[in-house]
Amino acid sequence: MIDTLGKATRHNMLLKVECACGNVRYCRSADLMMVYGGGANPFRLRFDCSRCKPEIKVTLVEVHPEHLPRKLVIHKPM
């Protein structure tokens, strides 16, 4: 079971972040790990929607590096 950002990064996974209004973004687990740390639970991260303020659904998605989604969000550490 993949329950940390570190494990998701080892499997080269993306986080699919969906809002009830239809807003969808994909985030690389490696980028999120640099910000939140490898032990962070990806399902407990807080995301906000730019359109509304509903409950956000997070899904881990395994993809091939050459077939990345168009709405990929790159998180840079501050």
Image (cartoon, rainbow, N blue to C red):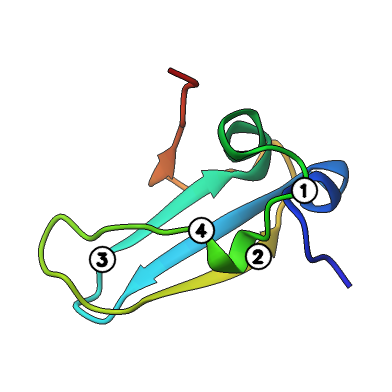
Whole-number angstrom distance, CA of label 2 to CA of label 3:
16 Å
Q: Residue furthest top?
A: 78
Whole-number angstrom distance, CA of label 2 to CA of label 4:
12 Å
**What amino acid type is highlighted by mark number 2?**
Leu
Residue at (22% x, 78% y) in the render: 54
First in sequence, mark 1 or 2: give its number: 1
Whole-number angstrom distance, CA of label 1 to CA of label 2:
15 Å
First in sequence, mark 4 or 3: give its number: 3
Look at mark 2 in the image and give the residue it sits on.
60
Location of residue 10 with respect to 7 vertically, above or below: above
**What amino acid type is highlighted by mark number 1?**
Gly
Look at mark 3 in the image and give the residue it sits on.
23
Disc 3 versus disc 1: nearer the observer? 1
**What amino acid type is highlighted by mark number 4?**
Leu
Q: Percent from the top left, x then y, of residue 20?
A: 26, 82
Q: Quadrant of residue 29?
A: top right
